[in-house]
Amino acid sequence: MNTPHVVVVMGVAGTGKTTIGPLLAARLGVPYAEGDDFHPQANIAKMSAGTPLTDEDRWPWLDAIGEWAHERAGLGGVVSCSALKRSYRDRLRAAAPGVVFVHLTGDRALIEDRMSHREGHFMPTALLDSQFATLQPLESDEAGVGVDVLGSPEEITERAANALEDLPEPVQ
């Protein structure tokens, strides 16, 4: 991998996107952007109240992330974004065709346990079921890799970085 990828670290809430994203960015020597920072305040208020977002709520958020990814094309970057549905990933790819995905996967019980121990996050554990119900895993025609979240953040990051090395050069 000579040209840096723009990587979207995706997965349901609690898989460690905000932990793994910065570690992976540091490992790749590229900037990191926190996907939650792209949410309008109305989305954060809705999720904080335990109400799942609709697709209409997500479009401006995905467009903002897609714009960031587009600006990083050829330069590389890592951004966290749940990207649970194929249509969400398609929207990101429409803005940034060379984007690749690292799908953080894991056992629901492990993820729920991790969510119950984190502090200061607006996403309640109660929304985990809706996240899994919405999740459409990466398909074979999507550029990306699945990485299990079992183990330490450093181990997960190592697996992700190694898996990314096997991907073809990004499309500009």
Image (cartoon, grey):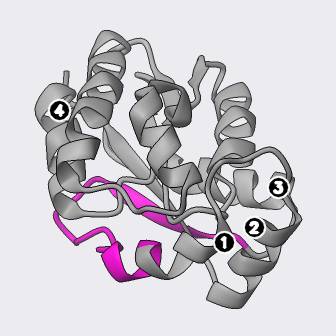
* Extent of the magenta region: 131-149
Q: Residue furthest left?
A: 94
The residue that mark 4 highlights is: 97
Mark 4: amino acid: Pro
- Disc 1 vs disc 2: which is toward the camera? 1
Residue 153's mark?
3
Query: Can residue 57 be seen?
Result: yes
Could you tell which of marks 1 and 2 lies nearer the N-terminus? Answer: 2
- Disc 1 vs disc 4: which is toward the camera? 1
Could you tell which of marks 4 and 2 lies nearer the N-terminus? Answer: 4
The residue that mark 1 highlights is: 125
Q: Is residue 95 found left or right of 23 in the rendered image?
A: left
Q: Position of residue 159 (x, y in %)?
A: 67, 60
Q: In what element is the residue under mark 3?
A: helix
Decide: few, some or many residues near mark 1? Use Cα within 10 Å; few <14, some 14-19, many ≥20: some
Q: Residue at x 62, y 50 (%)?
A: 17
Specify whether residue 151 is painted magenta: no
Could you tell which of marks 3 and 2 lies nearer the N-terminus? Answer: 2
Q: Position of residue 49 (x, y in %)?
A: 55, 56
In the rendered structure, are the residues bearing label 4 and label 2 in contact, judged by CB atoms less than 8 Å apart?
no
Q: Position of residue 155 (x, y in %)?
A: 81, 60
Decide: few, some or many residues near mark 2? Use Cα within 10 Å; few <14, some 14-19, many ≥20: many
Mark 1: amino acid: Thr
Q: In what element is the residue under mark 1?
A: helix
The residue that mark 2 highlights is: 115
Could you tell which of marks 1 and 4 lies nearer the N-terminus? Answer: 4
Closer to the camera in the image, 52 or 84: 52
- Disc 3 vs disc 1: which is toward the camera? 1
In the rendered structure, are the residues bearing label 1 and label 2 in contact, judged by CB atoms less than 8 Å apart?
yes
Query: Can residue 170 be seen?
Result: no
Cα distance in 3D space between marks 4 and 2: 32 Å
Residue 169 in which image quadrant: top left
